[in-house]
Every structure is written in C-alpha cells, then in structure tokens.
Image (cartoon, rainbow, N blue to C red):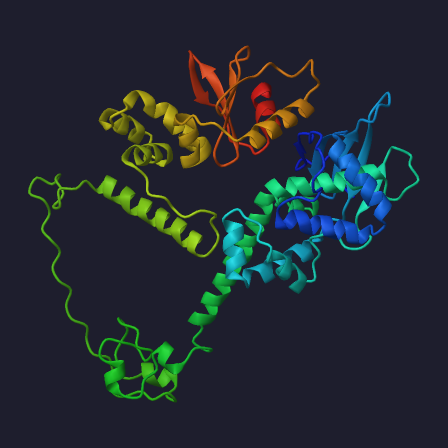
Amino acid sequence: MSDGHDDRARGFAAFPARKGGRVRGRSWWSRAWAESMEDGWPEEEPLKKGRTVARSGRLGPLTVGPGRVAAQVHDGADEPYTVVLGLPELAEEQWDALWERTADRPTETEALLAGELPPDLLEAAEDARVGLLPGYGELEPDCGCGEPDHPCAHAVALGYQFSWLLDEEPQLLLLVRGRDWPTALEELKSALLLRAMSQGAEDDDPVTGDAEDVGVAGDAEDVGAGTDPAGRPGAAPTAGPVSAGTPADEAYARPAVPLPALPPLPAPPEDGTVPVTGIEADPLKRLVADAAVRARDLLAYILGAAGEPLRPLGRWQDTVRIAATHPDPRVPARLRDSCDRPQELDRAVEAWRWGGAAGLTVLEEAWQPGGPDVTRARAALSTGWEDEELPEIAVCDNRWTLSSRGLQLRYGRDGRWYPYRERSGTWWPAGPPAHDPVLALTDLLGG
C-alpha cells in the first residue's frame, strides 16, 4: 500500500447526503468496481451498513492515489478519523504486458488515445493476466473506528463512493493501480511506436521480403540501364541479365555504361544579390524546416505516438507559433511589424511558449467550466493549505484570481491550470500548466 504522500494523489470534494436510491454508480466501470468489491466482501450485513453510511454524507473529501483511497469520517466524535482502502499497485512488467495487449486492439487503443477508458480494456488486461478491478482479498480496509467488522461500514462506504467517482473519471482506476493518466498514455504510445518501428523494419528486410519486393529480376528488362542488380536507380548498370542466383560480386564486376554529362549550372543573378526565383533563401529554408516538423508530428499521430491530430491553424495562430518557435530572434520583430495585432503578439508568444496552441486559447478565451470541475478544484485547494494560509480567491468563469497577490490561475479546456502574473495591469502567462491547481498555485506563490 502506498504511504499516502505520492505527488500523483488527487483530492475530490465530499459527497453530500443522498436520499435512498441505488448506491451503485451509473457507468459500466462504476458498476464493475462495486460488483468486484461485493464479491470480495460477500457478507450482506457489512454491505448494507456501508450503503447507509455512503448515503449519509459523513465521509469527508476523498483522496485517490497509487495503491489507496482515503477519506475522513465525521460521525459526531470529537475528532474525525481516517478510513483507507488499500489496493496493490501493478508491477512494471504487468503494465508493459497490458499495453502490449492493448496495442493489439485498434478499437480500444483509439478510445484510450481519445481520453476514454473502454470497457473492453478489461479483456486486454485478462489477456495480459493483469487485474484492474480488485480481486478476491486484494481490497485491504483500514479504519480508525475500532469496529470489529471486517470490513467496517466506513470502508464499504468508501468503496461505494469511489465507484461514484468512476462515473465521472474512470481513469482513476488506473491511478489506484499505480499509473496516472498522462503516464499511462505515454506508455501506450511508446508501445505503439515500438510496434510500428519493428513492423517497418520487417517490411524493409530484404531477407524476409519476397523476391519481387527487393527487386530481383530474371532478365535485363527488369534490371535496366542505370540500376544495380536490386533495381535501385543511380548505380552502375550491368551488361547482361542477372538471375536470382547470381552472386553480388559477379554482378557488380560487369562493365558499366558511362553516365551522361551533368547539365550546366544556371547563370548567377546579374547584380549578384537578387535570387533568380525572387524568393529570399532564408524564409524558404525556414518554411521547408517547418513543413518537415509538421510532417513529423502528423506521422507521430498516425503511429499513435501523439494524443491528438494536428488541427489547422488560422493566420493569427500560425503567426504566434512561428514567432514563438523560430530560432532567429529577428523573426518576432518582423512579424510584429507586419501582423494585424502587433500590441498583442508578445503576450501571445509567451502563452504559446508555455502551453502551445492550448495555452494561446486559454489566454484569449473565457468560458464557464462544469460544476464538478469547480468543486474538485475547490476541494483540492482547501486540502492543500490550512484555512488561515489559503489566499482569498475570486472566481470568474475559468479564471481564479488572487488580487492581493497579483496572481491568477486559468482553467483550460484540456483540464490543465495555467498560471498568470499581473504586469502593469495586464495578465501575463507565468509558467507551465499543471493538472493539479494546488501545484500550479504553489509554483506561483513560490515565484
């Protein structure tokens, strides 16, 4: 069981009291978790008591981390006590086996890369002999209530409430087993990329390929002038037909036909300064390099090594991107002089450098996050500091402002928190985004 101090642990607001109704969650993963828990704890009386406690609202905010789920219990005693559910973390080789089996399943892989946790992932886990849901005897309850029942009602209640969290974020199941969501995706992408590279090497191997694939031919027409025995252009031609059984040294020892003369070079510009095409060489080189980078990113997405497809950029976005990523320090000044929004470019460049296209969107767009996102953020911030130390925060749309400190957090549609700092009455991007608002705010306060 984890010691509870893992940086990947996340906090969630306490569930309010509920009146009756089903205690199991709505989603497939939620119901599967509850069924696995009930199979491991088959006695009905503790389960019945646990369902009552789960609905009572007596459990405080939940903390979910590798190997554990924990909460405080408020039952009228002088001090609350802690209830913990421990679940063994998967070993490294188990995670490797899971992602290898998942890479065999295009549908499940596509769903994971899209941010979903498909139910059929359980089949891939079974193929890899890996348990995602708790097996018999794996859930280990630990509670300070002192009740003799094993498990006690508070541990059962915590198990049901964790299933409610899976309704909104089933990826927490991977976190309890030892992998946060970004790490899990990176490992899956690595498995996909390695598989694509190994398959490409097999396709290019002339030993395993067919004779037709490697260009071995039976007569002179298949080889032709200006090719080597494998049909590659530019090598010395042979003087006669080469059969599949001809040794390479014998084939290359045959007389070669002379190559044609090279065409003359184009004449230089008359004044020696203006390019023949009318296009300066420096921008053209940069455009070629930029096209190569974007082609690489597109290939990475096709091979499964990138989470999202490339999206076309508008003129303003592309201007910001070039200014932010171009190695020549003169480029931002040139773009500032020629773009439609010169006063905004420097701040937009700073946003792109910290967060890419998503960072630029956060700079320019205000929106209203959903209630659960706001609740989780408040819970995380409230548990990150003592009450007297937590700065006063004003919330407007997706922007959480500490006016007294000149600091601000902006919540992006990608689920990350972007730090901002006030400069002369204007909010400027101030650092890399973080999934945890506590970490983002701590970095700002420390800065």
Q: Is residue 170 above or below residue 190?
A: above
Q: Position of residue 217 (x, y in %)?
A: 32, 84
Q: Is residue 324 left or right of residue 279?
A: right
Q: Is residue 178 above or below residue 396?
A: below
Q: Position of residue 447 (x, y in %)?
A: 56, 20
Q: Residue furthest left?
A: 270
Q: Nearer the viewer, residue 155 or 446?
A: 155
Q: Is residue 443 left or right of residue 52?
A: left
Q: Nearer the viewer, residue 190 or 225?
A: 190
Could you tell me if residue 439 is visible in this image?
no
Asked which quadrant contains residue 23, the reply is top right
Q: Is residue 97 above or below residue 253?
A: above
Q: Is residue 26 left or right of residue 396?
A: right
Residue drawn 70% across the image and 42% down it: 22
Could you tell me if residue 81 is visible in this image?
yes
Residue drawn 55% across the image and 64% down it: 104
Q: Is residue 244 left or right of residue 387?
A: left
Asked which quadrant contains residue 311, the reply is top left
